[in-house]
Amino acid sequence: MRTRETTLPGVIVIEPVVHGDDRGWFQETYRQDELASLGITDVFVQDNQSRSARGVLRGMHLQVGPNPQAKLVRCARGAILDVVVDLRRGSPTFGRWESWQLDDETGRQLYCPVGFAHGFVVLSEVADVVYRCSAYYDPGNEMSIRFDDPAIGIDWPGGPHHVSDRDRGAPLLDEVAQRIPFTWKP
């Protein structure tokens, strides 16, 4: 596995080695010792998968409370633009976002650490997104920020986007910044 540099400290983009021939290809999608060598030492306890059509936009989500979630995200079918926003108070990159295309050709994965909001938009006709979580889902501790918050300015491609009522009605970052419990640790 190789990594790509990001501008947000703690976020890691992972590129697997893909072994291919005329029959197709093979890649390792999860290997704990390799991830540990890259600095990812979370114990992942829950796997989730979603299927979405072109233009579906999901985000920006995070889990707070006693069991915040780190995520290891990949697109097993199709292509997405995956986005993270730094929500660690005191971070020099607080409120900044970065995005990467994840798809079934490259097998690229994104490690989204605790303290970041996560979302994506589907670029292909259909996409299956698989993500490992470091804590169990807890609906009482989920939090969202608006995907189109002008103060953050995420440049979502395509459109029109199909967005849930929940995501469309999420608060702006300024409205919830004081409730975000994550603090940057250099």
Image (cartoon, grey):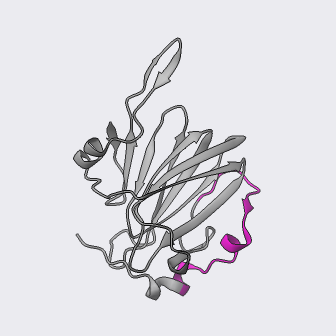
Query: Seen in the image, is 16 located left or right of residue 82?
Result: left
Percent position of residue 105, x then y: 53, 31
Query: Seen in the image, is 179 located left or right of residue 161?
Result: left
Residue in view at x 69 percent, y 77 percent = 169
- 46 and 50: which one is in front? 46
- 180 and 71: which one is in front? 71
Percent position of residue 95, x then y: 45, 71
Magenta stretch contains residue 168: yes
Percent position of residue 24, x then y: 53, 19
Is residue 14 shown above or below 151? Answer: above
Residue in view at x 33 percent, y 71 percent = 92
Residue in view at x 42 percent, y 27 percent = 18
Q: State the quadrant of the N terminus.
A: top left
Query: Seen in the image, is 183 located left or right of residue 80?
Result: left
User: Looking at the rendering, which quadrant does residue 115 occupy?
Assistant: bottom left
The residue segment tinted magenta is 155-175
User: Looking at the rendering, which quadrant does residue 175 occupy?
Assistant: bottom right
Is residue 97 shown above or below 128? Answer: below
